[in-house]
Amino acid sequence: MALVAGAWVASYDLIDGAGKITTASRRLVAADAAAAATAAAAHLTLLLATTDCKCIAYTVGQKYEENSLGALPSNTTFISVQAVISASIQDQPNKFASLQIPGPKLTDFAGTSGKLLNIVDVTNINITNYLDDFTAAGHVFLSDGEHLDPIYNASGERVTKYRRLGKQ
């Protein structure tokens, strides 16, 4: 089982006259990054010729897909159960980010039953490594291009989100 390079895709963020945003995703005919960028720009021109919406952004990337999934996660793993963590944003002491981990591991919580099962253990090495990746030394930004403060003052809880039918 491995994640392998798959199709090149483009996602176009479109806005309407009421300010509502939708995303139109397309699989591109492309063999490499340069061809994908060219294909995405060409398709955008054609898309904009058919819609009154405006394109406010688009993303081009390669999708990585599991080539041999095997067994599904355990039947006690649900995307609707999430570890929701609140942590402080760098250089903004009164602003906090909310990060969600869908289908968290049981070890992500302070205990395995009772009230402790509803508290995210922010001292757990897997949780701290995950949060560290959102700091300036990490690999990813928060949604607004910000980073977590290196001393992130994190707290978290178990939350069950509304479940919709998933893709099959």
Image (cartoon, rainbow, N blue to C red):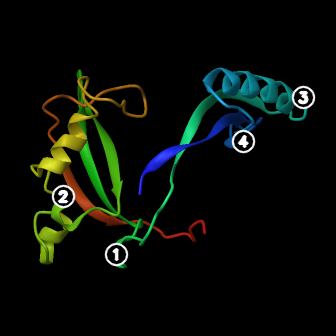
The residue that mark 4 highlights is: 26
Up the image or down, 92 lies above or below 160; here it is: above
- Mark found first going from the N terminus, 3 or 1: 3
- Mark 2 vs mark 1, foreground winner is 1
- Mark found first going from the N terminus, 4 or 2: 4
The residue that mark 3 highlights is: 49
What's the CA distance linking mark 2 and mark 1? Answer: 20 Å
The residue that mark 1 highlights is: 74
Up the image or down, 145 lies above or below 24; here it is: above
What's the CA distance linking mark 4 and mark 3? Answer: 16 Å
Secondary structure beneath disc 1?
loop
- Number of residues whose C-alpha sits closer than 10 Å to that of mark 2, classed few (under 14), some (14–19) or many (20 or more): many
Q: Quadrant of residue 84?
A: bottom left
Amino acid beneath label 2: Val
Q: Quadrant of residue 78?
A: bottom left
- Mark found first going from the N terminus, 2 or 1: 1
Amino acid beneath label 3: Ala
- Mark found first going from the N terminus, 4 or 1: 4
- Mark found first going from the N terminus, 2 or 3: 3
What's the CA distance linking mark 4 and mark 2? Answer: 37 Å
Where is residue 18? Give x, y as percent. 73, 38
User: Who's the residue at 18% across and 49% down the image?
Assistant: 126
Relative placement, left or right, of 114 versus 148 is left
- Mark 4 vs mark 3, foreground winner is 4
The residue that mark 2 highlights is: 120
- Number of residues whose C-alpha sits closer than 10 Å to that of mark 1, classed few (under 14), some (14–19) or many (20 or more): few
User: Who's the residue at 49% across and 70% down the image?
Assistant: 163
- Mark 3 vs mark 1, foreground winner is 1
Amino acid beneath label 4: Arg
What's the CA distance linking mark 4 and mark 1? Answer: 32 Å
